[in-house]
Amino acid sequence: MTDNITLPRAVVERLRNVLRELASEYPPGTGLISPEERTALAALDAALAEPESKTPAWWMDGLTATLMREGVNKHRAREIAVGYWEAYCQIPGNEEDKP
């Protein structure tokens, strides 16, 4: 099992709304929703409040992983991936991909 799951933003927003309704039915102290779960819900709210990135995470992760397999340090590989994405956005005709 993995700790990281990728879901479409609309699905995450819907799940957050369902959890928010559930949390409102059971006030703190009832023991039905743990403090850790309430903290996780607050973190989810904060994450959804941030604007959605135009850079595809799957693309960045894939390039980073490829560079790491070739022996590049993880942090340097991420810098290179960001550089490639920024260069890609400078190519005429790719305006819709710009952040």
Image (tube, rainbow, N blue to C red):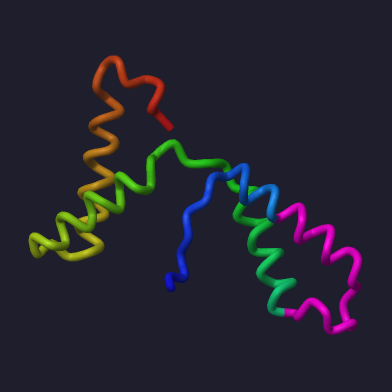
For residue 29, above or below residue 15: below
Write the residue at 46% across / 64% down: 4
- Quadrant assignment, res 20: bottom right
Instruction: Name the spot of residue 44 as percent of width and height, x first.
Output: 64, 59
In this picture, residue 47 sits left or right of residue 92 = right
Q: Residue furthest left?
A: 70
- Quadrant assignment, res 39: bottom right
Instruction: Name the spot of residue 52 as percent of width and height, x first.
Output: 53, 41
Write the residue at 26% across / 55% down: 78
* Numbered range of the magenta stretch: 16-35
Observer-nearest of 19 and 97? 19
Figure quadrant of the N terminus: bottom left
In this picture, residue 2 sits left or right of residue 61 = right
Instruction: Name the spot of residue 77 as percent of width and height, x first.
Output: 20, 56
Q: Is residue 82 magenta?
A: no
Q: Is residue 24 magenta?
A: yes
In this picture, residue 7 sits left or right of residue 60 = right
